[in-house]
Image: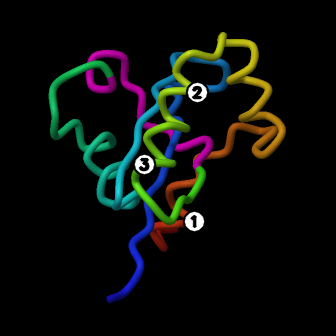
């Protein structure tokens, strides 16, 4: 049975903008849904669609625990985490989706 991957991700509306933290087993599909505004809700309302950070996990329990932990962090810690890995707040989606 092939192993599945799970992802915790952070989306931003712009550099230093509104943040959204989520968890999924298909990062490309889920971020595409946010970008296309397929589901009404927070990310659609605040135009949060720039993938600025993600982590990969082998099991859903650890991914969910990490998502819940990150959601409890204060904004300064979240921004520091993003900037440690992505200092320019580049949109990482084209790189993982194979888009230009």
In the image, the segment drawn in magenta is 43-54
Vertical side of 18 occupied by 20: above or below? below
Please tell me which of labels 3 and 1 falls first in the chain.
Answer: 3
Determine the image quadrant of residue 84.
top right
Q: Toward the viewer: 14 or 42?
A: 42
Residue 100 horizontal/vertical position (percent) = 52, 68
- Residue at position x 40%, y 53% in the image: 60
Residue of label 3: 61
- Residue at position x 81%, y 38% in the image: 87
Q: Is residue 61 left or right of residue 39?
A: right
Q: Secondary structure at mark 1?
A: helix
Q: Nearer the viewer, mark 2 or mark 1?
A: 2
Callout 2: 10 Å neighbours few (<14), some, many (20+)?
A: some
Q: Is residue 74 left or right of residue 13?
A: right
Q: Is residue 25 left or right of residue 8?
A: left
Q: Nearer the viewer, mark 3 or mark 2?
A: 3
Please tell me which of labels 3 and 2 falls first in the chain.
Answer: 3
Q: Nearer the viewer, mark 3 or mark 1?
A: 3
Circle on res. 70:
2
Residue 64 horizontal/vertical position (percent) = 43, 40
49 inside magenta stretch: yes
Q: Secondary structure at mark 2?
A: helix
Residue of label 1: 95
């Amino acid at each position: 049975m092939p192993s599945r991957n799970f992802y915790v991700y952070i989306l931003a509306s712009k550099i230093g903008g509104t943040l959204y933290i989520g968890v999924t087993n298909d990062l490309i599909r889920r971020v595409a849904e946010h970008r296309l505004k397929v589901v009404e809700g927070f990310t659609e309302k605040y135009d949060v669609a720039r993938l600025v950070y993600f982590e990969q996990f082998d099991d859903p329990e650890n991914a969910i625990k990490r998502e819940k932990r990150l959601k409890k962090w204060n904004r300064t810690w979240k921004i520091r985490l993003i900037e440690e890995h992505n200092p320019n707040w580049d949109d990482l989606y084209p790189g993982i989706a194979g888009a230009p």
